[in-house]
Image (tube, rainbow, N blue to C red):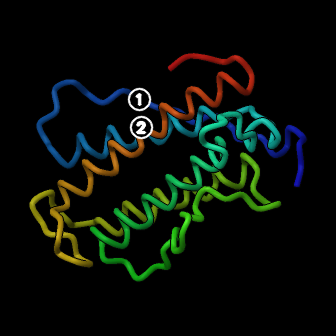
Amino acid sequence: MSNTSSSAAEPVDRAWPDGIAEDEAGIQWDFLRFLRATAVNKVAGLTREQAAATPLPASPRTSALGVLKHLTAVERWWLSIEAGGAELPSLWEGSPDPSWELTEDDDPRSVVAAYRAEWALSESSLAGVSPDDRARRSGKFTVRWVFAHVLQETARHTGHLDILRELADGSTGE
């Protein structure tokens, strides 16, 4: 465990999706990529201590790193396993949801690396799937619904990251 700048995550490039979208799946991916990059950028430059802080009294498990670990678990379950049918272990088995918990080894760089690795798994798991298709695991959802769910979950938690970043070091912004 380290509080040095070597454990800090680097910012990633992001691009606002094109306003003249004609492809439903494409615009969903573009917005998800934008939100993912925004989430990562909210922890870029934070020390482990700042990123692991839980400053919200009503949410004592909520840290910036915990949010990113949770978003990693969300993508694993909903995009890779449920929609894509991938044979991967879930990252949130148990109660309360363990995806929010930090280990000694979790720092901004390692948690961001795990989140970014999950992006590739999500995208490969959904190769060849269209919004109208049924989720490959259960068939209880359309891929369109799963994507909408992941987008709202990622957007909601990126808002939490806005607050956690401001509380960590006063930074505000997009």
Q: Name the residue type under label 2.
A: Arg
Helix, strand or loop status at disc 2: helix
Q: Nearer the viewer, residue 137 or 60?
A: 60
Spot occupied by residue 86 in the image (x, y as percentages of width and height): 37, 77
Vertical comparison of 72 with 5: above or below: below
Give the residue drawn at x 40%, y 42%.
33
The image quadrant of residue 173 is top right
Spot occupied by residue 127 in the image (x, y as percentages of width and height): 28, 66
Give the residue drawn at x 75%, y 34%.
46
Cβ atoms at labels 1 and 2 below 8 Å apart: no
Quadrant for the N terminus, please: bottom right
Question: In the image, which disc is placed on residue 166?
Answer: none
Spot occupied by residue 3 in the image (x, y as percentages of width and height): 89, 43
Rate crowding at label 2 as few (under 14), some (14 to 19) or many (20 or more) other CA atoms within 10 Å. Answer: few
Count of numbered marks: 2
Vertical comparison of 67 with 162: above or below: below
Rate crowding at label 1 as few (under 14), some (14 to 19) or many (20 or more) other CA atoms within 10 Å. Answer: few
Spot occupied by residue 36 in the image (x, y as percentages of width and height): 47, 42
Q: Disc 2 marks which residue?
A: 156
Give the residue drawn at x 36%, y 73%.
81
Please indicate whether residue 156 sits to the left or right of residue 50 in the image: left
Q: CA distance from mark 1 to mark 2?
A: 19 Å
Give the residue drawn at x 72%, y 48%.
109
Can you name the residue that lies furthest to the bottom here? 87
Question: In the image, which disc is placed on residue 15?
Answer: 1
Q: Nearer the viewer, residue 12 or 164?
A: 164
